[in-house]
């Protein structure tokens, strides 16, 4: 992520935390990250993982897209890139993302907030995805909807996969 995007994310994260009256220690503890990492992130430094950003969104009780909305560049790590396309304004909250997984990627994602569902529509490539223990293989044009409030994964083989990903949030009142 470039410096401007990191700074923007950090300022937005800090404003969300402060609006709740939370200390750095409280949010870091709740999200299971080091206070020093959260401090660096709020200062526009560091290199946050997708899981770290998800954990912070869950603890702040906001959709992932709300936390990353001010950023216009893809977020990525370990062969996976995601970029927010649009956020719905209705209930339930629905976020739309473009997602790319490089060849030979295995991405394990943590459980999201209770009741959250993901729908993947594969645009190109080949992908296995879904909740841990349930494997569904997708080819271009196919879609899959699954509960994302359980650990889940995405796996590619010899070619990259691109997809549209929608996240439909469930209950936003109770962080896991």
Image: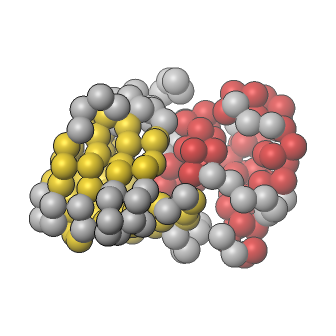
Front residue of this view, candidates 53 and 27 = 53
Query: Residue, x 83% and y 32% (percent of image)?
Result: 25
Image coordinates for residue 28, horizontal then vertical, percent: 76, 35
Residue at the left extreme, as displayed: 141
Find residue 110 and report its horizontal and vertical position in percent: 48, 36
Q: Quadrant of residue 160?
A: bottom left
> In this rendering, would 4 be left or right of 103?
right
Q: Is residue 22 visible?
A: no
Counting from the top left corner in percent of width and height, residue 88 is at: 34, 56
Residue at position x 35%, y 51% in the image: 155
The residue nearer to you, when weighing 89 against 141, is: 141
- The residue lying at 48 percent from left, 27 percent from top is 173
Does 120 sit above or below residue 158?
Answer: above
The quadrant the N terminus occupies is bottom right
- Viewer can see residue 152: yes
In the foreground, 1 or 92: 1
Picture layout, residue 114 above or below residue 71: above
Horizontal relation, residue 164 to residue 110: left or right:
left
Query: Total label count?
Result: 0
User: Residue drawn at (58%, 69%), measured in percent from left and top?
Assistant: 71
In-image side of 144 versus 17 (left or right): left
Relative to the observer, which residue lies in front, 106 or 36? 106
Q: Position of residue 52 (x, y in %)?
A: 63, 45
- Identify the image's colour scheme: rainbow, by chain, secondary structure or one colour: secondary structure
């Amino acid at each position: 992520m470039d410096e401007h995007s990191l700074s923007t994310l950090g300022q937005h994260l800090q404003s969300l935390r402060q609006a709740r009256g939370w200390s750095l220690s409280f949010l870091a503890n709740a999200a299971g990250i080091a206070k020093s990492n959260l401090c660096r992130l709020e200062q526009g430094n560091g290199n946050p993982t997708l899981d770290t950003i998800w954990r912070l969104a869950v603890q702040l009780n906001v959709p992932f897209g709300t936390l990353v909305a001010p950023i216009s560049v893809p977020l990525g790590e370990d062969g996976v890139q995601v970029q927010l396309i649009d956020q719905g304004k209705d209930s339930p909250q629905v976020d739309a993302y473009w997602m790319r997984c490089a060849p030979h990627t295995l991405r394990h994602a943590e459980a999201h907030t209770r009741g959250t569902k993901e729908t993947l529509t594969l645009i190109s490539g080949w992908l296995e995805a879904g909740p841990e223990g349930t494997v569904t293989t997708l080819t271009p044009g196919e879609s899959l909807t699954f509960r994302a409030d359980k650990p889940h994964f995405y796996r590619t083989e010899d070619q990259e996969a691109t997809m549209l990903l929608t996240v439909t949030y469930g209950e936003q009142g109770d962080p896991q």
